[in-house]
Amino acid sequence: MQLKKNKRITSQNYLKYYYDIPYEGKTSAGRALRRLKNITCPYRGIKIISTDTIKGFEKNLARCKTAQDAVNLLEPYQQNMLPVEKSIFAIFKDFIRLNPDDNLQNCLQMIKMNCLMKLKLEEMEVLDDVDMLTRKLSPQTAMKVREKTTRCRQIILSNCKQDCFKRKTFLNSLEEIIPKDNERDIFNNIKNKALFLPTSESSRNAFVVKYSKRKQVEIVRRLFIASTGSIEHITPQSLGGINTIGNFLLTSASGNRYRENMPLSEYIKRHPKIPLYMQMYVNDIIREIHAGNLEGNETYPYKIKKKLMEESEGRIMISLSEYKYSEEDAAKAVEEYENRWANYNKQKSNK
């Protein structure tokens, strides 16, 4: 999606327009986290690109004319890239050795057909897993699910351009099925398994197929923004999660988007290193608090430790051994901060 002409790019609207993730959301409670730098993504383990780099990146992107220009612009962010984006960038680096004056869209179009075949196989494997789980359902409910997966297979195997497989359409179609009361847990497992259908966040093949239709500027922007910061609800809003810093994580945009509404305990199955990355994230947060960069939020580590334990069903156990504040001292620090602000605002209003 393109910004309207002359619309100013900010860290608040960047992800909304280009990645369909509302960075600002409906609250300012995550503002303190968004200001932090050099934070490990708790989902993917990479260092998050600070959003204060967005304007400069976008300005330089407007000057990119060739594939060589694009690769040069992305090079400083290579270490921040996630596996899919890093593998695509490696393809681009090979491409410019022989085609420096070409463009990246042509590069993706050259390998699209091979990636499309591989993508179809990836999609089929997930549908096979879904069908396997239907064996635990009643015949009536199982047939309803099988009808959906059979239709998906027909679309995947078809070469008709007007009738292409849409992951979101399939996920929505499962919501049309109403299982019996004693089947709800199994059916939820089926829906969670369906979330593993490949996307451009999880599959290099899906990325190539999708972005071979996009211009170079969109391809480059996509590689960059996947690692920029996004505020994530630990408990999704759709499941009752509230807009408070105790329910927030600062994650990479790609990690946020790919989780969707997947339960954290299920997401860990997809990325088994999440508990390790969460500890690295909390250690970074502790470092920032000790440096005075998260003043007024000293209780945050304790809040998310409890929240992560609950949401992950005990799979994430955070250590706060390096934290200088006890839970009681952290609460006092927050109270003192709030009192200082209250007195400041009172004095200001009396002037």
Image (cartoon, rainbow, N blue to C red):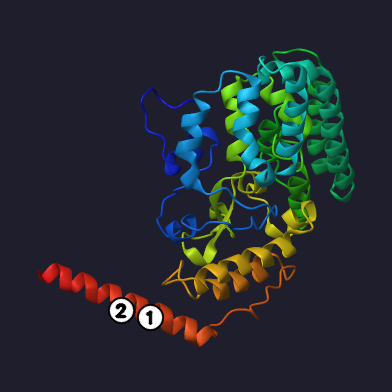
Frontmost residue, 210 versus 156: 210
- Tell me residue 90's x, y (percent): 76, 33
Along the line of sight, the residue nearer the viewer: 121 or 237: 121
- Give me the residue at 63% from left, 78% from top: 320
Question: Mark 1 = which residue?
Answer: 335
Q: Residues within 10 Å of mark 1 (few under 14, many from 20)?
A: some
The percent position of residue 230, horizontal first and vertical second, equals 54, 49
Q: Quadrant of residue 181?
A: bottom right
Pick the front one: 50 or 304: 50
Instruction: Please report the residue visible at 49 percent of the width from the left and 71 percent of the height from the top.
Output: 291
Above or below, comparing residue 79 to residue 216 in the picture: below
Q: Which residue is mark 2?
A: 339
Task: Name the residue: 73% across, 64% down.
Answer: 275
Can you see residue 163?
A: no
> Label 1, label 2: how many angstroms apart (C-alpha)?
6 Å
| Amino acid at circle 2 | Asn
Q: Is residue 31 above or below residue 307?
A: above
Specify the amino acid type for callout 1. Glu
- On residue 2, the disc is none
Assess whether mark 2 and mark 1 are in contact (beta carbons under 8 angstroms).
yes
Compared with residue 68, is residue 23 higher up or lower down, i.e. above or below? below
Q: Is residue 8 left or right of residue 53?
A: left
Q: Quadrant of the C terminus?
A: bottom left
Instruction: Evaluate whether residue 313 shows in this view.
Output: yes
Mark 1: which secondary structure? helix
| Above or below for 69 versus 302 | above
